[in-house]
Amino acid sequence: MSKIRDEVITANAKYAKGFGDKSELPMPPGRRFAVLTCMDARLDPAKFAGLSEGDAHVIRNAGGRASDDAIRSLVISYKLLGTKEWFVIHHTDCGMLTFTNEIMGDLLASSLKTATVDADGWHDSADGSGSIEGRFINWLTISDNAKSVVEDVQRIRNHPLVPDGIPIYGYIYNCKTGKLIEVPIPE
């Protein structure tokens, strides 16, 4: 067995032992808001947004981007579970700033193995076991943090399944200070 798997199972057993009245939490988030943010392991939305279990929906993906699936989750959060406000939170030093759609497509065409990066950029094993399918996906990479936050908030606001009037806020989390920096969103 994997050492990581064992650690996760042990941690879960300890957590479950003290679970207590968390089993009584209702399905709708108690504070009625949702956060769309990056999957980066350095971000802990519970800590930077002051959340406890049951407070809010947290939707995470690479870059915290407003992909179709993220918008699907936000619409479900609102329509079926009553969230009233949404936060789009990107962050400094995001891995999505380190490559483009073309780079990702080329890496995947070369190999499906894990790539490496150094001062000269991204590199792959080029073992020939890749797939050109990666060239047909928009990876929603980021070239400018503030611009991507604005784009994502506007994409959500303009989606036909998102009703008018839901406040959608845009922020950048600073990985060096832990602070949220508001991004002004044009109307």
Image: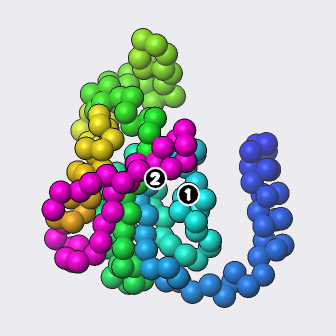
Q: Where 36 sits versus 122, above or below?
A: below
154 or 114: nearer the viewer = 154
- Residue type at mark 1 is Phe
- Residue type at mark 2 is Leu
Q: Is residue 170 left or right of residue 123?
A: left
Q: Which residue is mark 2?
A: 180
**Res 155 seen here:** no
* Quarter of the image that includes the C terminus: bottom left
* Tags 2 and 1 touching, CB below 8 Å: yes
Q: Position of residue 7 (x, y in %)?
A: 79, 50
The magenta stretch spans residue 28: no
Which segment did they paint magenta? 159-187
The magenta stretch spans residue 169: yes
Q: Which structural element holds mark 2?
A: strand
* Residue at (50% x, 50% y) in the render: 179
Q: Is residue 130 left or right of residue 154?
A: right
Question: Residue 148 bears which disc, if any?
Answer: none
* Residue at (36% x, 79% y) in the render: 84
* Residue at (36% x, 68% y) in the render: 86
12 or 153: nearer the viewer = 153
Q: Where 136 sits versus 56, above or below?
A: above
Q: Position of residue 165 (x, y in %)?
A: 23, 77
Q: Main secondary structure of the magenta part?
A: loop
* Residue at (62% x, 84% y) in the render: 25
39 or 181: nearer the viewer = 181
Quarter assignment of residue 44: bottom right
Question: Residue 48 bears which disc, if any?
Answer: 1
Q: Position of residue 95 (x, y in %)?
A: 44, 35
Q: Position of residue 131 (x, y in %)?
A: 35, 31
